Image (cartoon, rainbow, N blue to C red):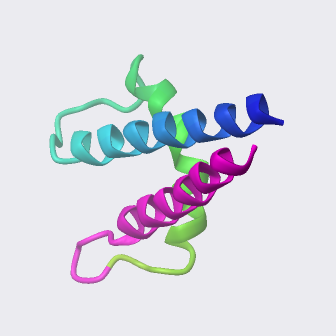
Amino acid sequence: MYLLISTLATFTQIYTVLLIIRVLLTWFPTINWYNQPFSALSQITDPYLNLFRSFIPPLGGMDFSPMLAILLLQFLGSLIGGLQVYA
């Protein structure tokens, strides 16, 4: 049980870092998202971000869905981290 919880906690941390990298790279408009490694990063992170984009449309040209996505992932990571104490 400890191995599963530890793996989930590590996954949430790595995925959060990938989301932050994805958001930071959107500040550079010259990036071609069809070239590697940007294409792989987009394929990994966009399905999760699209869940939140369906609830929160861009307001004034700003996309606030990544903030909600990262906050939820951090919340789940802290819940999983709390379970590590009991495992």
Q: Nearer the viewer, residue 36 or 67?
A: 67
Left or right: residue 75 versus residue 60 is right
Q: Residue drawn 17% across and 34% down?
A: 30
Q: Nearer the viewer, residue 33 or 78?
A: 78
Q: Is residue 61 magenta?
A: yes
Q: Residue furthest top?
A: 36
Question: In which quadrant of the rendered image does the C terminus lie?
Answer: top right
Query: Height in image: 31 above or below 85?
Result: above
In x, y percent, where is residue 54? 57, 74
Q: Is residue 56 magenta?
A: no
Question: In which quadrant of the rendered image does the N terminus lie?
Answer: top right
Q: Residue drawn 67% across and 39% down?
A: 8
In x, y percent, where is residue 62? 24, 72
The image quarter containing residue 25 is top left
Left or right: residue 70 versus residue 31 is right
Count of numbered labels shown in the rendering: 0
Q: Main secondary structure of the magenta part?
A: helix
Q: Residue furthest front?
A: 86
Q: Nearer the viewer, residue 25 or 61?
A: 25
Query: Height in image: 60 above or below 12?
Result: below
In x, y percent, where is residue 76? 59, 59
Q: Nearer the viewer, residue 84 or 35?
A: 84
In x, y percent, where is residue 58? 35, 76
Residue interval drawn in magenta: 59-87
Q: Residue drawn 22% across and 82% down?
A: 60
Left or right: residue 37 versus residue 27 is right
